[in-house]
Image (cartoon, grey):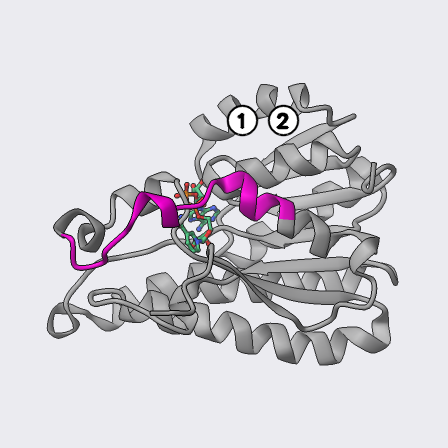
Amino acid sequence: MRFQNKVAIVTGGASGIGLAVAKRLASEGARLVIADLNEDNLNKALPEVKAAGAPDVWISICNVAIEAQVEATVKGTLERFGRLDVIVNNAGLMQFKALEELTGDDWLRILNVDLLGTFYFTKQAFLHMKPGGSIVNVSSIHAVETEPLVAPYAAAKAAVLSLTRSSALEGKPKGIRINAILPGAIDTPMLWNNPNVKSGVEKIDRADVGKPEDVAATIAYLASDEAAFVQGAEVRVDGGRLDR
Ligand code: NAD
């Protein structure tokens, strides 16, 4: 029970990897805040996370791209639970568009969610977390090797690694750990809606597809005190794509 008496916020926690993380932390005793845009999926996720064993769960409808909503989620967390120990910055958005069709607004939409959302929660953590706190940023394998049609997403996920390094340096004297995880192909709606996967441009062998629970297990480790000496790390969870 690594998260007994701890309070965790999981962004994008109503689906896919985020939901698996929320259930994993719940099963290890965390009191949880699931923050997501999608109210319907939040309401579906709530009983699942409770059933996984969470002593208390609060769902927060939150667009991570809007700083005031992030502040409200953290304020609500502190009012309800009195503390904040873990943030998993998982909410993410992917868009498929050829470079010549991309607009500045497309770039801003992706950067606002995938990069600034992570920044806003990190800022709140630095303002409110006590020493011993931990942040896990969900980047992507796209940060280091990518595919056509996803330039803003790949750039945003690479920037999340950079933000992880900067915040790990500034978090260290505060006793706050920040690490990043780079999932490969994971079996969620985001993967199978990918036109590169559908068309075969991105060759996905079923054997190379991980489960959300595989990612959740590594995130839980990084978020826990077992990883007390792990700071600013970038952990690939991709089943071994190093030969590509
Ligand atoms: P998903 O689409 O199943 O879940 C994403 C969740 O984020 C959804 O519940 C969605 O409502 C929420 N969300 C989107 N925009 C939001 C916003 N502005 N504010 C709050 N919530 C928002 O996708 P997933 O595959 O579980 O992805 C989770 C994370 O993992 C993302 O950051 C994604 O980039 C990353 N990732 C996924 C894969 C994969 O193969 N599935 C691979 C690498 C990285």
On the image, numbered disc 1 is attached to which residue? 45
Query: Picture coordinates of residue 14 (x, y %)?
Result: 50, 35
SS of the residue under disc 2: helix
Q: Where 223 sits versus 112, above or below?
A: above
Dot 1 falls on a residue whose secondary structure is helix
Q: How many marks?
A: 2
Image disc number at residue 49: 2
Is 242 located above or below residue 55 in the figure?
below
Give whichever of 39, 210 is nearer the camera. 210
Q: Can you give x and y, in whole percent of width and height, for residue 205 in the image?
A: 29, 49
Q: Looking at the rendering, which quadrant does residue 112 occupy?
A: bottom left
The residue positioned 37% from the left and 54% from the top of the image is: 93
- Mark 2 touches mark 1? (CB < 8 Å): yes
Residue range highlighted in magenta: 200-217
Q: Is residue 137 magenta?
A: no
Q: Residues within 10 Å of mark 1 (few under 14, many from 20)?
A: many
User: Is residue 202 shown above or below 243?
Assistant: above
* Three-letter residue code for mark 2: Val
> Is 145 left, or right, of 79 in this rendering?
left
Q: Quadrant of residue 51?
A: top right
